Image: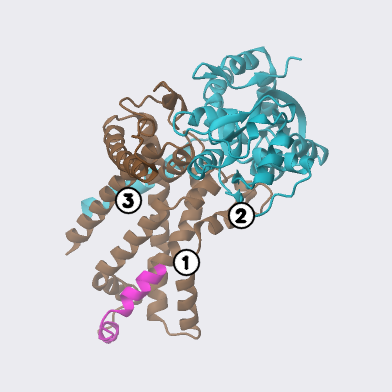
Chain colours: A cyan, B brown
């Protein structure tokens, strides 16, 4: 019995010790779920980590929370897709050195039968108007993510205030919302990466793509050291230079899921 | 869809052979039947995945298990160290407001984990009062949150355990001239089963919670990702079978720890 007890004690102490030992050079980055879940960071980070002998800690959350973490100085660099919110973040002095990195696009996804006749629409506004008129079910992210922000922006442009039983606010990530849209035979606005990842699991189809308003640019911003002296600006700057430099941009351009390119580099323009 | 997709995408970025696409080949027998079919398939696949996960000896998977264990054991140990004496003290002493304290402790046991996570986020954030310790997004930070989750449980259950003892015990001890320390030891010995139960319950609560681990750990791959946050991530990506497999693994780990505690308890009699 004493033996078991002492083993337990040693175990606990080693846990406590192990928790304090790993304090190497780390760069903290908050980013949107789409960059991590698409698998892009899995190929983009290792070369940087190796070259600089650092570890990049990725905190993948919604865009709203990702920027909030930057505001509070809990991360060193922010990698998101919400241009208006990003500009506000910089103008309020929380971030510096904002750079364009890449873009992908949003698509309007819905059931094959297409009850609202979205297929005939030429623009995103027109498509949403048709959905609202026919009161076909529309699943919204409802979580203040970049995708949700884009959706609200299109509703506003179309002059519609989406309300009613047909407008479902899920409050969840892109994956569950796509799943829900499929289960409810509803429409939703999705980013292409997540949709491609789900393609085999749901049989919702792309009904609208290629409209300029559905363009989705990603930006990277370093957290301002003047606001948060503990932020690791030096490393953040190095990372920004890497991602927007030739090596990082090449990795982004060459990243494919099922043979399809997901992100289109923007920094070298 | 080629089966390689899931390998790039899962949270361990490691190959999981023998994974199929259960949603793909459902028979067209009406929606309900099809749904049942997928559910059955998915549970079976979950068990199959759990099996190969445990016996793959994949270092990435075991690191997640290790992180989970580390933070949970540390939190349980620390909260027992403080909570058991506190519980004894509250039970033995008579003071004003004791019943109010008891009601408060009972209420604390209903604390939503996400709220504890939020409170500690505010405290540990670089903007917060404890920001200088750099505990946010580290395993130690998670442990701190879990410690406060477990504490009311340990105090409360220890308190109840001692209330259930024969009141003559303490009187006898006092009459025989035992010191406070000796009395406490005697009480511990008499109530050992119920107190072990308190520790077991606390451990169960901390290893299975996800709100604190997500909020304070940030679900950082290879650093603060625990089994529960990995499950949440895989589920949000639509990898339901894999999430289930991790859940089964978590239960297996809990079985191991509880087995150890049981041996400890048995050894004492």
Q: Which mark is residue B110?
A: 1
Using the numbered discs, state the Cα–Cα distance from disc 1 to disc 3 in whole angstroms: 30 Å
Residue A91 part of the magenta-drawn span? no
Judge from the rendering whether residue B160 lies leftward or rightward of residue A111; answer left or right: left
- Numbered tag placed on residue B229 in the rendering: none
At numbered mark 1, what does the secondary structure look like: helix, strand or loop? loop
Q: Which mark is residue A9?
A: 3
Q: As displayed, is residue A87 above or below residue B113?
A: above
Q: Residues within 10 Å of mark 1 (few under 14, many from 20)?
A: few
Crowding near the residue tagged with mark 2, few <14, some 14–19, many ≥20 C-alpha atoms within 10 Å = few
Position of the C terminus of chain B by quadrant: bottom left
Disc 1 to disc 3: CB gap under 8 Å: no
Vertical comparison of B38 with B205: above or below: above
Label 3: chain letter? A
Q: Which chain is indicated by disc 1?
A: B
What residue lies at 41% left-to-right and 69% top-to-bottom?
A: B155
Query: Residue B65 appears at what percent x and percent y?
Result: 37, 40
Q: Is residue B9 above or below residue B161?
A: above
Q: Is residue B169 magenta?
A: yes
Quadrant location of residue B218?
top right
Image location of residue A173, percent across then percent down: 56, 42
The region drawn magenta spans B155-175
Label 3 sits on a secondary structure element that is: helix
Q: Position of residue A225 (x, y in %)?
A: 75, 36
Main SS of the magenta segment? Answer: helix
> Which picture quadrant has residue A264?
top right
- Looking at the image, which is closer to me, B163 or A94? A94
Q: Residue furthest right?
A: A91
Give the residue pinned by disc 2: A165
Where's residue A185, x and y in %?
A: 52, 42
């Amino acid at each position: 019995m004493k033996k078991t007890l002492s083993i337990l004690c040693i175990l606990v102490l080693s846990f406590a010790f192990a928790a304090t030992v790993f304090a190497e050079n780390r760069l903290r980055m908050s980013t949107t779920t789409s960059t991590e879940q698409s698998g892009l960071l899995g190929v983009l980070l290792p070369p940087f980590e190796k070259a600089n002998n650092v570890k990049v800690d990725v905190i993948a959350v919604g865009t709203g929370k990702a920027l909030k973490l930057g505001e509070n100085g809990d991360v060193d660099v922010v990698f998101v897709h919400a241009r208006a919110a990003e500009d506000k973040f910089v103008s309020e002095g929380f971030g510096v050195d904002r750079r364009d990195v890449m873009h992908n696009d949003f698509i309007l996804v819905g059931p094959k039968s297409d009850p609202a006749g979205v297929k005939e629409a030429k623009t995103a506004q027109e498509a949403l108007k048709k959905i609202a008129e026919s009161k076909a079910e529309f699943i919204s992210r409802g979580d203040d993510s970049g995708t949700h922000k884009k959706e609200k922006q299109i509703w506003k442009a179309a002059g519609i205030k989406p309300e009613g039983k047909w407008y479902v606010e899920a409050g969840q990530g892109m994956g569950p919302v796509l799943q829900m849209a499929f289960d409810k035979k509803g429409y939703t606005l999705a980013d292409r990466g997540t949709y491609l990842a789900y393609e085999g699991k749901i049989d919702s189809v792309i009904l609208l793509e290629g409209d300029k308003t559905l363009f989705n640019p990603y930006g990277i911003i370093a957290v301002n050291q003047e606001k948060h002296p503990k932020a690791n600006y030096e490393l953040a700057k190095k990372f920004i230079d890497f991602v927007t430099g030739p090596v990082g941009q090449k990795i982004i351009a060459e990243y494919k899921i099922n043979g399809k390119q997901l992100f289109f580099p923007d920094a070298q323009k | 869809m080629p089966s390689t997709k899931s390998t790039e995408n899962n949270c361990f970025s490691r190959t999981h052979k023998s994974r199929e696409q259960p949603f793909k080949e459902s028979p067209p027998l009406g929606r309900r039947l099809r749904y049942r079919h997928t559910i059955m398939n998915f549970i079976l696949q979950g068990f199959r995945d759990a099996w190969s996960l445990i016996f793959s000896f994949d270092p990435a998977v075991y690191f997640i298990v290790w992180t989970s264990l580390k933070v949970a054991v540390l939190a349980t140990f620390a909260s027992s160290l403080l909570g058991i004496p506190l519980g004894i003290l509250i039970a033995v002493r008579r003071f004003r407001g004791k019943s109010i304290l008891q009601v408060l402790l009972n209420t604390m046991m209903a604390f939503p984990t996400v709220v504890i996570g939020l409170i500690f986020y505010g405290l540990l954030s670089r903007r917060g009062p404890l920001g200088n310790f750099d505990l946010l997004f580290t395993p130690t930070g998670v442990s701190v949150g879990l410690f406060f989750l477990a504490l009311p449980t340990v105090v409360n259950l220890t308190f109840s355990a001692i209330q259930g003892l024969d009141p003559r015990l303490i009187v006898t001890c006092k009459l025989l001239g035992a010191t406070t320390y000796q009395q406490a030891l005697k009480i511990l010995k008499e109530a050992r089963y119920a107190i072990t139960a308190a520790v077991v319950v606390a451990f169960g609560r901390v290893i299975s919670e996800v709100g604190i681990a997500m909020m304070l750990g940030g679900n950082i791959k290879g650093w603060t990702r625990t089994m529960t946050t990995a499950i949440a991530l895989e589920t949000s990506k639509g990898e339901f079978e894999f999430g289930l497999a991790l859940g089964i693994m978590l239960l297996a780990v809990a079985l191991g720890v509880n087995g150890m505690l049981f041996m400890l308890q048995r050894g004492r009699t």
